[in-house]
Amino acid sequence: MKISVLGCGRWGSFIAWYQATVLKNEVISWGPEGDYSYEVLKSTGKNEYVTLDKNITLTCDLKLAVESADIIIISISSQGLRGFMQRVTEFNVADKPIVLCMKGIEESTGKRLSEVLEESGIASDKIAVWVGPGHIQAFTQGIPNCMVIDSSDESLKRRLADGFKSNLIRFYYGNDLVGTEIGAAAKNVLGIAAGVLDGSGYVSLKGPLMARGASEVGRLISAMGGQFQSAYGLAHLGDYETTLFSEYSHNRRYGEMMAHGAKFEKLAEGVMTAKAMKRLGDKYGVDLPITNAVYEACFLSHVFESGNGAKNCMDIILKLFERETKSEF
């Protein structure tokens, strides 16, 4: 099987490594010429996460990567997906399944990433998403985890999950594309909140954050036509639990450094996802107190300028304790 992985950053390079090293597929790993991640792999044959396998062809030729593939996997920044698809659809992709290995919501529209693909001209029965718990550093040490593949097309979902499974990753079939995508994206928002708690010394609040966060994400999923219980599955709560305590999570680290009044320079998808979720909460009339607190901390609190990030971030989160008493369920 020929797999093309478009995007060779942290997650994209791991997916290429997994497909070639574990599944023994023939893999093309694509990155844009001049991009830091691509140039590191080109010059050294490795990055800080993986070493390129002999079954991996590294290229900056997008036409070659797209037209050579039986299956296309995309792993780039979620906010760049719509623009990137304008380039991908210049080539013949009509019969090729496209798998999104990325977690986010388009900030400018509130669209799920599968919706962005559909609006880019990809048929819904060719679209799948691959999400769930796991950090590259653990996977490459041989530590297994469970993940989810979901699609509106039942046969595609099953073919991919069965074809991609191994002793390193156990796949489950998703059964709620809305819940899978929203839950996976929202995990990153709550990861930022967990990092703020870590950075402020309120670690014991991460348990309540996990429970109440899943509840509010479930409300949003339901309002958007998905299943409330999806918030308690692998795509959201399962992944969030991994993020909550992981030294490797970019989003948790972003929140932790924000609480210290410092900048985290790597990509933290939860920042723009908080903005997108606030948009969705307003659109669907869903109360999202934790999401709104993260949004305020990221966009409205000026924590970096104040020099007192921990106090400002925690003031925002502790406002949640002023809310009126209500039933848990």
Image (cartoon, helix red, strand yellow):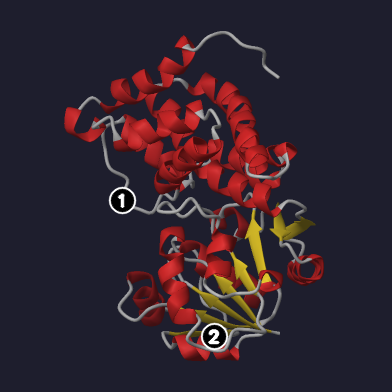
Q: Where residue 92 sits in the image (x, y, percent)?
A: 57, 89
Disc sitting over residue 265 in the figure: 1
Q: Secondary structure at mark 2?
A: helix
Lower sequence index among marks 1 and 2: 2
| Amino acid type at image mark 2 | Val
Q: Residue at x 79, y 71 (%)?
A: 159
| Position of residue 275 in the picture relative to residue 309 (left or right) | right
Q: Secondary structure at mark 1?
A: loop
Q: Residue at x 52, y 77 (%)?
A: 52
Disc sitting over residue 141 in the figure: none
Residue at mark 2 = 66
Rendered position, 118 above or below 229: below
Quarter placement of the C terminus = top right
Q: Is residue 28 visible?
A: yes
| Amino acid type at image mark 1 | Glu
Rendered position, 119 above or below 279: below
Question: How much space separates mark 1 and mark 2, taking CA atoms?
Answer: 31 Å
**Label 2 packing within 10 angstroms: few (<14), some (14-19), many (20+):** many
